[in-house]
Amino acid sequence: MNTTQIPIQLTPGAIEEINRLKGLQTDSSKPYLRVGVKGGGCAGFSYILEFDSKQEGDEVYDIEGISVVMNIAHGLYLEGVAIDFEKGLNNRGFTYSNPNATKTCGCGTSFG
């Protein structure tokens, strides 16, 4: 486990929802929560948030008992990102607050 500075933050709401989803997870070959980015989306990049296995080039972090993997190269885009989970009637799901984003889109899952 990496004990250096964790590049992302999970809010209590995100931790609660991730733990709930982790309890439903049946694929034991994917024990980690992967946080990352991929090209695409209406603003240039989209966020990755899924259960996965550890890959070459990943760093492993422990956030409140959740084992998180992130490709080292994604740290440039994710440094300082806060991931939250909203339970509202109009907005339900994971949201991202990215201080590095120069543009975002209305869906909240794409940034540039």
Image (cartoon, grey):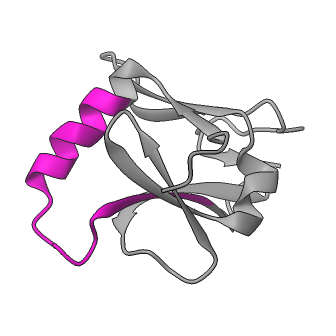
Residue 47, above or below 9? below
Q: Could you say where residue 97 lies in the image, as x and y percent from the top left?
A: 65, 28
Quadrant for residue 16, please give it.
top left
The total of numbered circles placed on residues is 0
Left or right: where does residue 25 sit relative to residue 60?
left
Q: Which residue corresponds to the image point at 36% horizontal and 33% vertical from the top-left?
A: 64
Instruction: Say whether residue 20 is magenta.
Output: yes
Residue drawn at x 31%, y 39% as measured from the top left: 65
Q: Residue furthest right?
A: 102
Q: Is residue 39 visible?
A: no
Q: Residue at x 34, y 31 (%)?
A: 15
Q: Is residue 96 magenta?
A: no
How far across and down, in percent of the image, does residue 22 sit? 20, 50
- Residue 1: x and y, percent? 48, 56
| 94 lies left or right of 47 | left
From the viewer's side, name the closer residue of 111 and 18: 18
User: Does residue 33 sit above or below 27 in this rendering?
Assistant: above
Front residue (pair 6, 71):
6
Give me the residue at 71% from left, 39% from top.
105
* Residue 20 seen in the current view: yes
Query: What span is colored magenta in the figure?
Result: 15-36
Q: Is residue 98 above or below residue 34?
A: above
**Quadrant hosting residue 50:** bottom left
Question: Front-most of 12 and 6?
Answer: 6
**From the viewer's perspective, is 61 left or right of 42?**
left
Figure check: 29 above or below 100: below
